[in-house]
Image: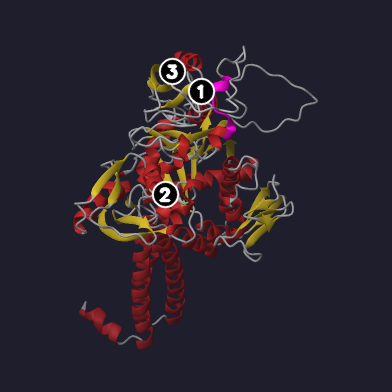
């Protein structure tokens, strides 16, 4: 060793310093390179091992060989090998940057272990809370913001002496606040986004949070994990958050307007896409299976949405991705635009603007000025981020409203997936990561996300060999209008029901793709040369199965008509004869006819086993009626048609004379 040191002292000082600095630079960048390569677990393992070994051997050769060259004073060899080592160190630095950026970006889109939950005490503008105020709270004890934190806020602000009224539904509670039956309600901070879109709740904008209480707690969604790997068939639930700001709030509740189930089979590279309309009326799993629009499940958090969707489809959700659609703008722009076939609109006006036969929609800031509207001609074209978001949001220009919007969102998702597979620039990857990091949250682990590399590689190879990147099977849920009343004294909401036969066909398709059931072979075939054939859309055209029904309005009907209906629906009918002293008396109805009923029309019939009707006593003297209501006899082929509510009845807002409050006050016609 002493001899070696003595010889190195005699070596060229400049080359010795170059040798030492180059060795340190190479060693540092090489070690970081090894760490970053190890982080990419599951991606080209053999190649990663070969790279580590090759560059490790080079480091060993450089250190030993150039040590000898220094002693032998072979300066040219030292200069050449040092130059090569410096170039490799620079390459390592670039590789480390991009690998670290990729790994950090993927890590950041996972659910945080702890997030801040917030409960607001919301009142009407100008209102205050006094000792005599009535406060509304959700009675679901698993609801963190609507119940758990609400109770803590009550203690914090000394509100325990106020009268507390519990509700099983946010809709009923908000309705009572807007009608001034209660003075304040406990809601999460996103309440305007979640509930403000309902026509009946347009006045919700005229409210404010008089008290706010926040608490950092363990994220309830961080427990929604799975061990399923991406090399076997899996399901993914895409949940869209339609917001005016970029980024996802660290808060469980969101508006849930977009729910899309994607099943993917990595063996066949086949996917199915099923968009669930936001207004679909289903049992909400986390709210005692009480029926409501499926998008309302998002008010209780991601876990409630997943449980509700699983209950509806009988399919386990393996992964979920929650995306703020405002982030679509940056994502599509980072991809350099996507190719979409814009559907021609059915109507000309949107948000009060005449679109002139073209597609038009507000921009990402919901600006309806001439400069803020997005205009597109129908047809296949490349669109940018603002245009993609507008097309994904729009529903008022199309006949089927939210159903058409779901179809357009599927188009955009498919186009993004195809464009992402054709990326050939590292700078594009950096832009994409920056676009999605703040706008996507998922329960996928970093390792699971990285394992999607093999799937993407298979897609690209398949695209090169067969010209098919990915096979996507579309679905369509057949539906019908289902106006329902929000509570016995509430307003009507325009929900939709679905045909069970249509849903069953979609469920069968998804289970086949997941290899949960055998594929059903089509054993019949017919062909008509005069028929225009299009791609099959599973679920479309199937209108079989039991539809949901609501309570009809029996006021003014005969007892016989109601008895027939009750018998058909297996409902126990109670009949009470009343006089003018009764609170249920209806002076506008002839004696012997139904004056009132204890369950309001428009209430869903599920779980209703009894109905009480109140009949004006025939001995009661009633005021003269110039034109008594005409009672038409039922038609022979449909004995119940005349007693079921018409579209006008069910879609109109209930008047004061036809409402029943929580104490079952009488209906009057």
Q: Is the magenta region chiefly helix, strand or loop? A: helix
Q: CA distance from mark 1 to mark 3?
A: 11 Å
Front position in the image: 24 or 176: 176
Can residue 284 be spotted in the picture? Answer: yes
Magenta stretch in the rendered image = 641-648
Front position in the image: 492 or 576: 576
Task: Pick whichever of labels 1 and 3 is earlier in the sequence.
Answer: 1
Q: Is-magenta flag for residue 441?
A: no
Secondary structure at badge 3 equals loop
Secondary structure at badge 1 equals loop
Picture layout, residue 524 above or below residue 366: above
Residue at 40%, 53% in the rendered image: 191
Which is more foreground, mark 2 or mark 3? 3
Residue annotated with mark 3: 619
Which is more foreground, mark 1 or mark 3? 3
Task: Pick whichever of labels 1 and 2 is earlier in the sequence.
Answer: 2
The disc at residue 449 is 2
Residue annotated with mark 1: 590
Q: Is-magenta flag for residue 642?
A: yes
């Amino acid at each position: 060793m002493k001899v070696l040191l003595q010889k190195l002292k005699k070596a060229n000082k400049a080359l010795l310093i170059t040798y030492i600095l180059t060795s340190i630079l190479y060693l540092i960048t090489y070690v970081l390179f090894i760490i970053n390569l190890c982080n990419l677990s599951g991606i080209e393992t053999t190649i990663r091992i070969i790279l580590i070994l090759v560059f490790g051997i080079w480091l060993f050769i450089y250190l030993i060989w150039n040590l000898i060259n220094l002693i032998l004073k072979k300066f040219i060899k030292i200069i050449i090998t040092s130059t090569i080592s410096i170039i490799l160190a620079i390459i390592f630095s670039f590789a480390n940057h991009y690998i670290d950026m990729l790994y950090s970006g993927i890590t950041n889109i996972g659910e945080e272990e702890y997030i801040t939950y917030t409960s607001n005490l919301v009142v009407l503008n100008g209102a205050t809370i006094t000792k005599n105020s009535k406060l509304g709270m959700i009675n679901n004890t698993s609801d963190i913001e609507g119940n758990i934190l609400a109770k803590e806020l009550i203690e914090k602000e000394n509100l325990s002496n106020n009268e507390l009224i519990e509700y099983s539904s946010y809709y009923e509670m908000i309705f009572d606040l807007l009608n001034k039956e209660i003075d304040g309600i406990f809601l999460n901070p996103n309440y305007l986004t979640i509930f403000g879109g309902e026509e009946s709740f347009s006045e919700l904008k005229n409210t404010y949070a008089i008290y706010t209480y926040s608490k950092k707690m363990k994220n309830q969604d961080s427990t929604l994990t799975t061990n399923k790997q991406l090399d076997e068939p899996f399901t993914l639930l895409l949940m869209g958050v339609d917001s005016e700001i970029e980024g996802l709030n660290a808060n469980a509740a969101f508006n849930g307007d977009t729910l899309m189930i994607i099943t993917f089979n990595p063996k066949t590279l086949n996917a199915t896409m099923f968009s669930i309309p936001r207004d679909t009326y289903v049992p909400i799993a986390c709210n005692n299976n009480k029926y409501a629009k499926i998008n309302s499940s998002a008010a209780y958090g991601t876990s409630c949405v997943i449980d509700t969707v699983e209950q509806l489809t009988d399919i386990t959700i393996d992964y979920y991705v929650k995306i703020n659609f405002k982030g679509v703008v940056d994502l599509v722009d980072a991809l350099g635009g996507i190719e979409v076939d814009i559907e021609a609109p059915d109507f000309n006006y949107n948000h009060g603007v005449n679109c002139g036969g073209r597609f038009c929609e507000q921009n990402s800031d919901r600006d309806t000025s001439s400069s803020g509207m997005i205009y597109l001609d129908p047809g296949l074209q490349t669109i940018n981020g603002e245009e993609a978001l507008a097309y994904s949001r729009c529903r008022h220009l199309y006949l089927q409203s939210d159903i058409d919007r779901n179809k357009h969102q599927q188009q955009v998702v498919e186009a993004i997936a195809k464009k992402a597979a054709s990326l050939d620039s590292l700078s594009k990857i950096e832009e994409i990561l920056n676009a999605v990091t703040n706008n996507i949250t998922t329960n996928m682990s970093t390792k699971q996300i990285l394992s999607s590399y093999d799937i993407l590689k298979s897609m690209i190879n398949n695209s090169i060999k067969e010209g098919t990147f990915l096979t996507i099977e579309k679905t369509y849920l057949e539906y019908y209008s289902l106006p329902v009343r929000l509570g016995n004294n509430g307003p009507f909401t325009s929900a939709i029901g679905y045909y069970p036969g249509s849903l069953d066909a979609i469920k069968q398709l998804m289970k086949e793709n997941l290899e949960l059931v055998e594929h059903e072979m089509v054993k019949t075939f017919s062909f008509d040369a005069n028929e225009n054939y299009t791609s099959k859309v599973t679920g479309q055209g199937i209108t079989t199965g039991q539809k949901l029904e609501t309570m009809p309005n029996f006021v003014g009907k005969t007892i016989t008509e109601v008895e027939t209906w009750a018998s058909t629906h297996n409902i126990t009918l109670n009949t009470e004869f009343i006089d003018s002293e009764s609170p249920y008396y209806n002076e506008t109805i002839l004696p012997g006819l139904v004056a009132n009923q204890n369950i309001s029309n428009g209430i869903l019939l599920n779980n209703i086993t009894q109905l009480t009707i109140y009949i004006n006593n025939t001995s009661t003297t009633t005021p003269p009626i110039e034109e008594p209501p005409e009672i038409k006899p039922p038609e022979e082929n449909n004995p119940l048609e005349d007693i079921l509510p018409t579209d006008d009845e069910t879609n109109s807002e209930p008047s004061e004379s036809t409402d029943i409050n929580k104490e079952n006050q009488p209906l009057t016609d």
